[in-house]
């Protein structure tokens, strides 16, 4: 699916339950070429598997967005800045077998 994500059509993609390789990275063939892959803030330090990633098209200037740090493997967030002001984009995975993500958001 990720290799079919057209960077000429989309600026952002919110992916849930991404395939992660043995070192914990999403690595479809075109990802790093066209997309900045944003993992949850604690992706490499939390033993829980990250359930979300955000893909930000490399055509978007890094001066116009930044990562919003959140301490959850189930939430990835960025803030976009522009003439429109500020917009937060959240990718939230809510597991069916617990409510920790909802508790985190309260």
Image: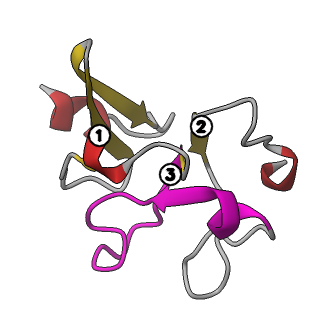
Under circle 2, the secondary element is strand
Question: Marks 1 and 3: CB-CB under 8 Å?
Answer: no
Residue 85 falls left or right of residue 61: left
Q: Residue 49 at x, y = what percent?
A: 47, 66
C-alpha distance separating marks 1 and 3: 19 Å
| Disc sitting over residue 72 in the figure | none
Write the start and end of the magenta stretch as one range: 30-56
Q: Residue 73 at x, y = what percent?
A: 35, 56
As rendered, which of 79 and 62 lies closer to the eye? 62
Q: Which residue is mark 1?
A: 64
Say which residue appears at 63% left-offset and 68% top-offset. 32
Say which residue appears at 78% left-offset and 52% top-offset. 2
| Disc sitting over residue 53 in the figure | 3
Residue 19 can be seen, yes or no: no
Residue 39 falls left or right of residue 5: left
Quadrant of residue 20 in the image?
bottom right
Under circle 1, the secondary element is helix
As rendered, which of 47 and 57 lies closer to the eye? 57
Considering every residue shown, the one lying at the far bottom of the view is 23
Q: Which residue is mark 2?
A: 13
Quadrant of residue 78 in the image?
top left
Under circle 3, the secondary element is strand
Q: Residue 57 at x, y = what percent?
A: 57, 46
Name above or below for residue 98 compared with residue 32.
above
C-alpha distance separating marks 2 and 3: 8 Å
Name the N-terminal-most of marks 2 and 3: 2
Name above or below for residue 103 compared with residue 26.
above
């Amino acid at each position: 699916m990720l290799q079919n994500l057209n960077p000429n059509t989309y600026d952002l993609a919110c992916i849930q339950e991404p395939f992660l390789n043995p070192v914990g990275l999403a690595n479809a063939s075109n990802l790093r070429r066209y997309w900045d892959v944003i993992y949850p803030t604690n992706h490499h330090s939390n033993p829980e598997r990250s359930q979300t990633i955000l893909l930000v098209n490399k055509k978007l200037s890094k001066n116009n967005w930044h990562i919003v740090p959140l301490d959850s493997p189930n939430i990835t967030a960025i803030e976009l800045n522009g003439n429109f002001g500020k917009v937060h984009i959240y990718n939230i995975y809510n597991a069916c077998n617990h409510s920790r993500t909802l508790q985190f958001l309260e």
